[in-house]
Amino acid sequence: MKSHTHYLWFNTKQRQEVIDITDEVAAQVAQSGVLEGFALVSAMHITASVFVNDHESGLWGDILKWLEETVAPWDPPRYRHNDTGEDNAAAHLRSLTIGHEVIVPITNGKLDLGTWQRVFYGEWDGQRRKRVIIKVVGE
């Protein structure tokens, strides 16, 4: 069985951003030489997410609005975690809600995604250096 590991690094300009990383993941699959297997894509920080969805800016706005208004408003006094001197409890809850990793099948040497599916990195507490691991395994 083959395996290949690569790290993507991010330092977002905004505290919250959604970034399409599909092409970078596909490039690592190609570099790995794996024809049949899986790609694990995982945020290595507890205030970030990796998810699969549609590449459409209106949807991204909807996701950010949903996180802010329904899931975890950015309201530091609201959260006990922030009593420690932090202000990012909302980012932890957003990551927990969206999830921190995905597994994407590889078929015939390519990511086997649905028609509109793309892989995204969701940053919920950015403006500092963070990373994502891409682990490709298979034959």
Image (cartoon, rainbow, N blue to C red):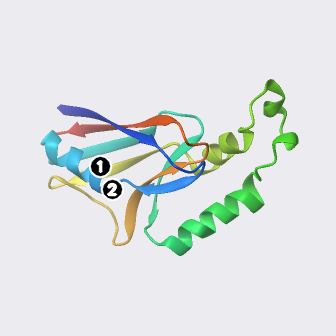
Dividing the image into 4 quarters, which one contains the C terminus? top left
> Few, some or many C-alpha atoms within 10 Å of disc 2 (few <14, some 14-19, many ≥20)?
some
Query: What's under tag 1, amino acid-wise?
Result: Val
Q: Residue, x 81% and y 48% (percent of image)?
A: 75
Residue 14 or 114: which is nearer the viewer? Answer: 14
Q: Is residue 38 left or right of residue 128?
A: left
Q: Is residue 135 above or below residue 13?
A: above
Q: Position of residue 97 (x, y in %)?
A: 64, 49
- Residue 90: percent from the left, percent from the top? 72, 44
In this rendering, the answer to whether 80 lies above or below 103 is: above
In the image, is residue 53 above or below residue 136? below
Disc 2 marks a residue whose amino acid type is Thr
Task: Please state the horizontal and vertical placement of residue 105, each as a whole percent of the image.
Answer: 30, 51
Q: Residue at x 77, y 53 (%)?
A: 73
Q: Is residue 40 visible?
A: yes
Q: Position of residue 120 (x, y in %)?
A: 44, 55
Residue farthest along the right direction in this orientation: 77
The label number, if any, that marks residue 102 in the structure image: none
Q: Which residue is mark 2?
A: 22
Residue at label 1? Answer: 25
